[in-house]
Amino acid sequence: MTLATSPRPSAHELEALEAGLREHMTTRLGRESASDPAHDLLHLERVVASAKCFAAGENADLRVVIPAAWLHDYVVVPKDDPRRSQASRIAAGEACAYLESIHYTPELLPAIAHAIEAHSFSANIAPKSLEAKVVQDADRLDGIGAIGIARCFACAGVMGRAFYSPTDPFCGGRTPDDTRFTVDHFYSKLFKTAATMQTSAGRHEAERRMAVMKRFLRELGEEI
């Protein structure tokens, strides 16, 4: 699918692009969505919605943002897999191979690949383009707030990790260890997310969601 050379494709072109990407990812995910609810079609839909919102505010190129957002988890490597830091690079390669197969505008593929590679926290790749910053913010935003809490505990269930340390639930006197305790992941990663946001809208929403997570931990503390 070759889009117009203008960075502002028509609404019809974008609708057709999204419809095709949604259909492809729905088929690709298949039953995997049920076994990994943290990286299912709903996750992709939320990331795409946030990315489009941020792109509008930052005047980013939707021809790059939309496919990168839909395909950013084209290959998902479990969080406890030793290849985890390579996942986004693998996903970028396979996603671009798919885009080539549908004859997507070839000159856009390097920018799409970079946006996919840079979205990952574990890959530690700095986003060099506006579009990569938008996609990174959109994906990271989905890891915090109410939905972030849900995804965190869903991952913990898959990996068989305890909810919290029985002796020090909130890491008051120890180094967080999210290989053992789910709540520790808030301290080792999730609370650091707001500082990594690249767009104005992303930073604003991240602050709101961080407050939600802190309120959750206060409530959890009352209950346990």
Image (tube, rainbow, N blue to C red):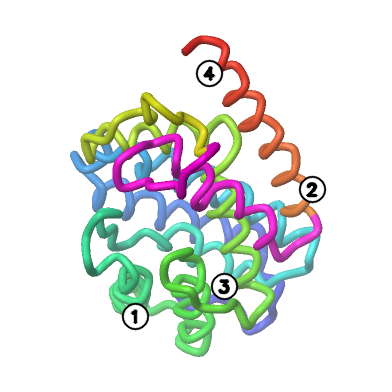
Residue 220: assigned label = 4
Q: Taking 28 as reference, is 196 above or below it?
A: below
Q: Which residues are magenta?
A: 172-200
Location of mark 2 (residue): 204
Q: Indicate whether residue 162 is drawn in magenta.
A: no
Q: Secondary structure at mark 4?
A: helix
- Contact (Cβ within 8 Å) of mark 3 with mark 1: no
Residue 197 occupies quadrant = bottom right
Location of mark 1 (residue): 100
Q: Is residue 218 left or right of residue 76?
A: right
The CA span between labels 3 and 4 is: 41 Å
Tell me the kind of residue under disc 3. Answer: Val
* Disc nearer the start of the sequence (3/4): 3
Choose mark 4 or mark 2, whichever is in front.
4
Q: Residue at x 76, y 59 (%)?
A: 56
Choose mark 3 or mark 1, whichever is in front.
3
Q: Indicate whether residue 187 is drawn in magenta.
A: yes
Residue 104 shows in the view: yes
Choose mark 3 or mark 2, whichever is in front.
2
Tell me the kind of residue under disc 2. Answer: His
Q: Residue at x 53, y 18 (%)?
A: 220
The picture places residue 44, in percent across and down from the top left corner, at 45, 48
The CA span between labels 4 and 1 is: 48 Å
